Amino acid sequence: MSKAKVVEWEFLIPFIAITSLFFLWGVANDMTNPLVSAFKKVMPELSNTQAAFVQLAFYGGYGTMALPAALFIYRYSYKKGVLMGLALYAIGALLFYPAAQFENYNYFLASLYILTFGLAFLETTANPFILFLGNPETATRRLNLAQAFNPMGSLCGMLMAQLYIVGLLQSDNYTSSEYAMLSVAEKAAIRTHDLGLISVPYMALGGVIILVLAAIALIRMPVQQHDISITVKESFRMLFRNKRYYEGVIAQAFYVGAQISCWTFIYHYVDHLNTFRPADAQLTATWYNMAAMITFLSSRWISTFLMKYIEPAKLMFYFALGGIALAIGAISIVGMGGLYCLIGISAMMSLMFPTIYGIALKDMGEEAKIGSAGLVMAIVGGALLPPFQGRILDMGGDGLADLALLGYIPEVNFSFVLPLASFVVVAAYAYRSFKS
């Protein structure tokens, strides 16, 4: 058992300040996940695939901005990277107001894209900074501890989405046939109301981010020593020779894709179950998604503790096997049992992101600043898998069970074959890591 401190006293204030960022991008992540379902209701002309473009725009920003962010902090400093990230985060959130005024879906996508530029800066900066903010022996545990505050922000984001978006949508008060029978003026009024509703929480979040930016600007951060003997070109060369690193980037892309798919399409999973339930016994998807997040958070704390006794890579291998088993359950069990399996997957996912990150950057020096960009760019997996899962839902039409695979598995269940495949990739990476 390691006796080294996870966080040393001299780094406590910077650690708290940077850890607050994990909370803040958790809010954005999970306030956005329900938008796929929300836009499909507000704009019924969108297909499931088109509605999933919310995730393509949101997580595509990571793929676009991660490397420029890494080059920025390589040239300047971690603190300036944080401030740049917060500024872009605020701008993207505030752009929801003109998007709602124009009532244009593409403008909302552009706002999310810019907002995620800021998140890319924050993640590219915060993750390696936490790793280096203390004893290397406890670096992976320290990152798991900081990342434990991310699902707390996610819970807040889900709650905000439910209370101020999903729960108040007027378009959700009508079935598809009832909505089609409304007059053009009635539909226009509902759309104006609902799109304005969607913009309000984001504008409020933008105001909060501006306040956080001002506070962090006043905090003194430790200055990372810059090794001028290592150029950016040499950093890339070292990374491409590091098998553990580039395999980690691949594993991270699959993991993030699985996470976002599970937390996005749980809404569709619940919507399908509701088709068999009476009006007075309808399930609220957000509460089940919040249950998944609470499970994720609890498991994150437990896994951080277990890393004192079990090698992180080996522990992640066991969790990945659990994720595979539960994904099979979510696919093959039609009914509440499948939903419970889908919720349980979150427990298995809890340690994966920071553990892959810590393993991939283990024992790195200055090249970790560039290396962090690859791992953040891997978050683009969250942009790619949801549209593919939406395509599976569209195989038989716009419904959620137009096709029955193997004669009894609805397509909404079968769509979770993508997260299943992703957990296989993570299990393989974990196994190779602790065996090497």
Image (spheres, rainbow, N blue to C red):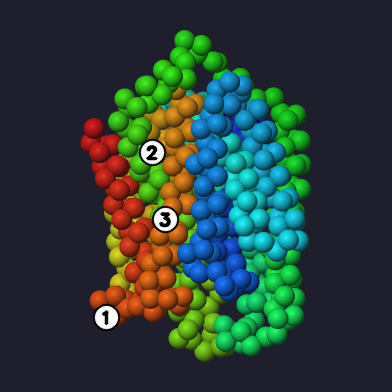
Dot 1 or dot 3: first in sequence order is 3
Give the percent coordinates (x, y) of residue 354. Answer: 45, 41
Give the percent coordinates (x, y) of residue 272. Answer: 45, 78
Res. 101 image quadrant:
bottom right
Measured along the vertical axis of the image, is residue 181 above or below residue 404? below
For this view, does 355 lie left or right of residue 202? left
Dot 3 or dot 2: first in sequence order is 2
| Quadrant the N terminus occupies | top left
Measured along the vertical axis of the image, is residue 132 above or below residue 267? above
Give the percent coordinates (x, y) of residue 324. Answer: 30, 58
| Quadrant the C terminus occupies | top left
Tell me whether circle 2 and circle 1 mark residues in contact (CB < 8 Å).
Answer: no
Residue under the point 60% across and 48% down: 113
Q: Pointer 1: what residue?
A: 407
Q: Pointer 3: what residue?
A: 385
Measured along the vertical axis of the image, is residue 77 above or below residue 52? above
Dot 2 or dot 1: first in sequence order is 2
For this view, does 383 lie left or right of residue 243? right
Q: Residues within 10 Å of mark 1 (few under 14, many from 20)?
A: few
Res. 189 image quadrant:
bottom right
Name the amino acid type tagged 2: Val
Give the percent coordinates (x, y) of residue 394. Answer: 42, 71
For this view, does 204 lie left or right of residue 367? right
Q: Pointer 2: what residue?
A: 249
Measured along the vertical axis of the image, is residue 363 above or below residue 196? above
Name the amino acid type tagged 1: Gly
Could you tell me which secondary element the residue under label 2 belongs to?
helix
In front: mark 3 or mark 2? Answer: 3
Q: Residues within 10 Å of mark 2 (few under 14, many from 20)?
A: many
Q: Residues within 10 Å of mark 3 (few under 14, many from 20)?
A: many
Mark 3 vs mark 2, CA separation in Å:
16 Å
Q: Which mark is residue 51?
A: none
